[in-house]
Image (cartoon, helix red, strand yellow):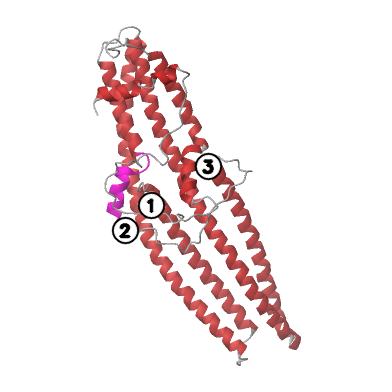
Amino acid sequence: MTSFARLWGAISLVVVAACGCQVASPQPSMPAGFASNDPPVFVRCSYPDEKESPGLDARSLLNLISSQTPALESVRALEGEAALRRHKASVSGAGWFKHLSSEERLWLAGAMAQDAQAAVKAADAIYKAQAEASELLVDLRASREAMKHIDESEARLKRVLLRAENARKASEAAAPLVEAIKADLAGRETARAKLAAQEASALARIKYLAGIDPAGDLQLDLPALDQSKWINGDIFPASCAEQASSIGPGVAASDSLVATLRDCVGLLEGKALVGSKAQSEKKVDFQGALKQAIAGRRELDAKLRLGAVEAAESVTASTRQAAAAAKLLTLAQAATKMIDDRVEMNAPGFGAKELFETEGALELARTEELKARLARHKAHARLWLLVGQP
């Protein structure tokens, strides 16, 4: 696209501005970079929450955030200023470009620059909000599973407590065991209350990020964390870095800002600026802004590449950890079943004490396995956003 064509596209909204300076909300439904002309995808990610559900799934929530997150309010203010600048530069008739005055060129250049800067701010705000919401969604899913584990272990502990109380009737030597089991059960009540508080806080934060009243209602579809096949095939950090650099969040907006500022400089160089000293200084300001935008694009590229590599490495490492934790959990479950069988058969040396000890080991194994899966899903969520998956 030529500079003239870009300028024509920028000025085309003058009519809208003249009719009331209406401000449109950011158009992309995902962070900048999620365009239809994306380069070939190196890593295909399939988001897990794609089934039909009465609740709002993760993909729909992130789309909602992209248009309603409160951080976009400052962006809309910039767009409003840009519309006013276009109105100041509005002209009609053939050959409008040749007949723009110095002042009109300044107004138009300012509008173009502010629009491009607003797009960069929007992409950054959307990405940050979506990244936070993605992690909170994973936390909620893990919290629901942890709550289920507490309920299941509590039921088993109550059976162990009953056996220990029967043993206490035969001998007071079992009294310390009974009290220890009661303390463990009380600890589960504390853990349940803590999880409930964390869930409420996370849900309120998600509603805020989505532009919903934190006191309002929001139904979410939260599938179990066992849906772990987000990425098909092997993950190559170098390929992820290339994809993030090409279509990651903010890339398109940053590239557009650089191109727009170049057009602004060209617009002001196309005709000698006459008038106040301030007008001449404005031309220098645009040149400085262009240099800053180029530097910002390079910095964004480095950050995206680093983030994608770190996320890809984290996916690989956390997947190995999750596999190892799953094996340990399987061993703990087998040991618990063996002890249960021995106790049921009234085998010598096996009683409530052994059941209580194996229950503790099983609970620890469950916790570590859940933590490993939580880390893996969070790494997947980070990578999914960084590589700009639509």
Q: Earlier in the sequence, mark 1 or mark 3?
A: 3
**Classed neighbour count for the residue bearing mark 3: other residues with Cα under 10 Å, few (<14), some (14–19), many (≥20):** many
Q: Mark 2 and 1 residues: CB-CB less than 8 Å, in contact? A: yes
Disc 1 versus disc 3: nearer the observer: 3
- Side of 277 relative to 212 (left or right): left
Who is closer to the viewer here, 350 or 98?
98
**Classed neighbour count for the residue bearing mark 1: other residues with Cα under 10 Å, few (<14), some (14–19), many (≥20):** many
Q: Disc 2 designates what residue?
A: 235
Q: Is residue 132 visible?
A: no
Residue at (52, 50) in percent of width and height? 56
Give the CA distance from mark 3 to mark 2.
31 Å
Percent coordinates x, y for residue 164 in the rendering: 69, 82
Q: Main secondary structure of the magenta part?
A: helix
Specify the label residue 155 is tagged with.
Answer: none
Residue at (46, 17) in percent of width and height? 19
Check disc 3 and report its element: helix, strand or loop: loop
For badge 1, the amino acid type reads Leu
Q: Disc 1 designates what residue?
A: 383
Q: Mark 3 and 2 residues: CB-CB less than 8 Å, in contact? A: no
Q: Image quadrant of residue 262?
A: top left
For badge 3, the amino acid type reads Ala
Q: Quadrant of the N terminus?
A: top left
